[in-house]
Amino acid sequence: MSIIKEGQIGTTTIGGKEVPVITVPTETTIKNLLTNTEYDSEEAAQADIADPNTATTAEHVQRNVKVKCAKLVDLIGLSGKNGK
């Protein structure tokens, strides 16, 4: 099961100036390479590593992350036709 986090747009203040903060949507898949098991969460993977009844170590856990980004045109709001 993939762990999906939605993106959001907001602002923060850095050095007295308000700057945009864009968090993009991500999809993370956590898988045990030894058993081919897909975990539902980071906590489930950590519990498996900590469990003395399994052979799972941190090296057996793989994380794949897909990051979805908007096209530059979508970010700046232009159609690609000289801003018109």
Image: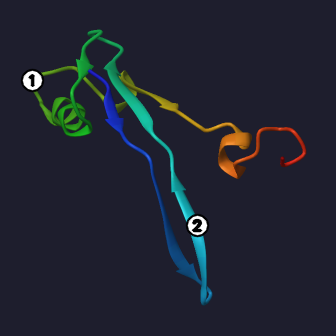
> Disc 1 on helix, strand or loop?
loop
Residue shown at 41% from the left, 31% from the top: 27
Q: Which mark is residue 20?
A: 2
Determine which residue is flagged by label 1: 53
Q: Is residue 17 left or right of residue 36?
A: right
Image height of 31 relative to 19, above or below: above
Tag 1–tag 2 contact (CB < 8 Å): no
Q: Is residue 16 left or right of residue 73?
A: left
Q: Is residue 76 left or right of residue 32?
A: right
Amino acid type of the residue that numbered disc 1 sits on in the rendered structure: Asn
- Outermost residue toward the front? 84
The picture places residue 36, in percent across and down from the top left corner, at 30, 9
| Screen quadrant of the N terminus | top left
The picture places residue 61, in percent across and down from the top left corner, at 35, 26
Q: Nearer the viewer, mark 1 or mark 2?
A: 2
- Outermost residue toward the right? 82
